[in-house]
Amino acid sequence: MSRDKDSDLEQLNAILFPGIDGTGKMYGPLLECLPDWIAPQVMNYPTQRVLSYTELTDDVLRRLPVAGEFIIIAESFAGPLALMLRERVPERVKALVLCGTFLSNPRPWLSIPARWLLRDWMLAMEPNKFLGKVFVTGFEISDAMLAKAISIHKEVSPTVIRHRLYDVFAVDVRTLYKQCPAPMLHLYGEHDHLILKHSAREFQRLRPDVPSVSINGPHYLYQMRPQQCSEQIVAFLQQRGIL
């Protein structure tokens, strides 16, 4: 377990938003690597109820700690959600870390055919392990972690997943990102084959002042490169004086 040696630092609250499954159960590797002075709270989303990004923002807002400031750590599907939440409680969000995510539809050429072709029975099928490794986890993933990811997939209604994919195809938070005054850090996988490089370039093009850091890893950065992610997050917080 990697922990910071300075135990005198004031606790910094962090809200962690998971990817499209919404369970937060894959955050374990990153939690193991965060320093003791970061106090994490992993949020989750309903697994059997369809909620849009706006409705998810309302749902999360009701479950935030009643008072106090925090940083947001988000991955993939949750990037737009993090920016939407910051807009609702700007005085409470000290910083945002956005990992392997997007500001607008990351695969615009899929939007129309996906609406015609996506079916619940397809999404209910067990994911193909080879394709999962190619697009999401990378080939270094252990059998145990891959089995856990597949079991989590089975917990979420395929209807919920389908509608979240529809929301991904329709989302556009570029204005929120451009106008966000809070410090932000963008992390992305050098070998992310799910969220392609043009999405990373959109972060860089719209806000050249926001650090955009490439990590040698797959889409599953928090799971497969947790130590590197933690180091980047800590360095960012220290550089911005958010301690």
Image (tube, helix red, strand yellow):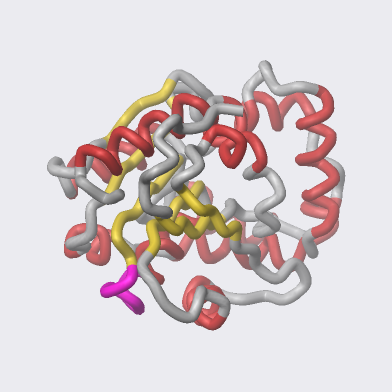
| Res 172 quadrant in image | bottom left
Does 241 lie within the magenta span? no
Horizontal side of residue 202 vs 110, given as left or right? left
Q: How many discs appear? A: 0
Horizontal side of residue 71 vs 19, given as left or right? left
Q: Position of residue 84 (x, y in %)?
A: 38, 70
Residue at image position (70%, 71%) is 46
Q: Position of residue 77 (x, y in %)?
A: 52, 54
Does 87 lie within the magenta span? yes
Q: Position of residue 1 (x, y in %)?
A: 62, 28
Horizontal side of residue 114 vs 121, given as left or right? left
In the image, residue 7 above or below residue 51: above
In the image, residue 25 above or below residue 182: above
Residue at image position (55%, 27%) is 2
Q: Which residues are magenta?
A: 86-92
Can I make out residue 193 in this image?
A: no
Residue at image position (76%, 59%) is 119
Query: Which residue is nearer to you in this view: 87 or 196?
Result: 87
| Res 127 quadrant in image | top right
| Res 128 quadrant in image | top right
Residue at image position (68%, 62%) is 162
Q: Position of residue 166 (x, y in %)?
A: 57, 63
Q: Residue furthest front?
A: 8
Query: Which residue is nearer to you in this view: 26 or 233?
Result: 233
Query: Which residue is nearer to you in this view: 49 or 242?
Result: 242
Can I make out residue 17 in this image?
A: yes
